Amino acid sequence: MMNKTDGKRSLLCVAGLFVSIIAPVMLFAARILGAAYNNYTFGVQFAIVLALIMPLGGLALSIAGVVIARKHDLRGVNSGIVGIIISGVEVLLIILLVIFIANYLSQAHTTPPDYTIARHNPEDAVNVKATIESVLNSDSEAEQTFATKSVELGFILGYENCYAEVENTGPGHYSWRIYNSEGQQIACQFGFSCEDNPDIVIVDVDGDGNNDLISNCCYGADGIERLYVFINKDDTIEVGVFNIEKYEEEQGIAVDSNDYKIYYSEESNCLIFHNNSDDSEKVLSTDDFVFEEYTSESF
């Protein structure tokens, strides 16, 4: 009498095991191939999709193989059981991945973008501002007229021991320049026909861990308010200016320089665009600014 060891092997069990094993191998190979050539062609994409579908086929083949093998007393039941275990784990992982992606996409569509700027040293920023105010609000009118003072700012834009030289050139007019320890000018702040209140904020604007600098500036007889963002990108200081052309294109209107102001809100810790015509406001991100290399001649 023929027993299992002498009988035929269940091809379904073998096929189920093979498919369950080859699926992760195909997925890994397609991922490596796409990354190596930096080009996910249709063939690579198809291989990835097929690799994600194959565990279902492997599970179905393994279950069918085990059932038929036991019914007809065929060999290969153990192979089928291993195929069920492997493909079952793969299917479970795929289900968890689909749930994660669906949850991520739902949050991306329902949660508004957070443009809040991460402060790293708000106390230092306030102290810097208070120190400069005390310099410019000197009791001596003669000292106020053409006074040049220096204040220590510490770590800014990736540089240690930065300092600012503040020059008050007369009532309602001031300018100051920020330097690193080597005397390289890395930022500025200025104001015309406005209160003598130097306005800087030291924060991490782009999330690289370095203290960047936001410069709230004011100029013109009408007190036009503008905001400039200074960042250190690959050891090059760049200054960001609000992209008014992009805004005009999006809104389909032309905007006069007196029709809006750009400023940093300490209350909301955000960059703000304020429309003077209707007092509406829009929270900005660095994507709304055009960055270029900063030099002492930029302003």
Image (cartoon, rainbow, N blue to C red):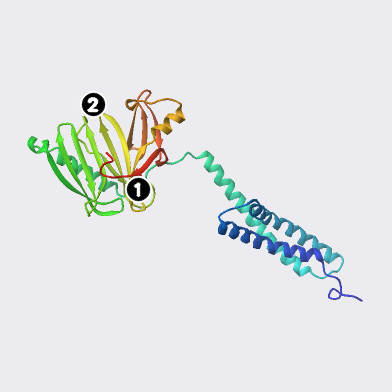
In the rendered structure, the answer to whether residue 139 lies left or right of residue 153 reads left
Residue 221's disc number: 2
The secondary element bearing badge 1 is classed as loop
The quadrant in which the N terminus is found is bottom right
Picture layout, residue 136 above or below residue 54: above
Residue for point 67% across, 57% down: 51
Regarding mark 2 in the picture, which secondary structure is present there? loop
Q: Tell me where residue 287 appears, x and y as whole percent.
A: 42, 40
C-alpha span from label 1 to label 2: 32 Å
Identified at 33% across, 27% down, the residue is 257
Quadrant in the rendering for residue 174: top left
Q: Residues within 10 Å of mark 2 (few under 14, many from 20)?
A: few
Residue type, mark 1 in image: Asp
Drawn side of residue 168 relative to residue 242, left or right? left
- The residue sitting at the right extreme is 1
Position of residue 253 measured from the top left corner of the image (x, y, whole percent): 43, 25
The answer to whether residue 105 is seen in the rendering is yes
Tally the numbered discs.
2
Could you say where residue 20 lies in the image, as x and y percent from the top left? 70, 62
Q: In the rendered image, which residue does mark 1 sit on?
A: 204
Residue 268 visible within the image: no
Q: Give the residue furthest to the front.
A: 297
Residue plotted at (72% across, 67% down) = 82
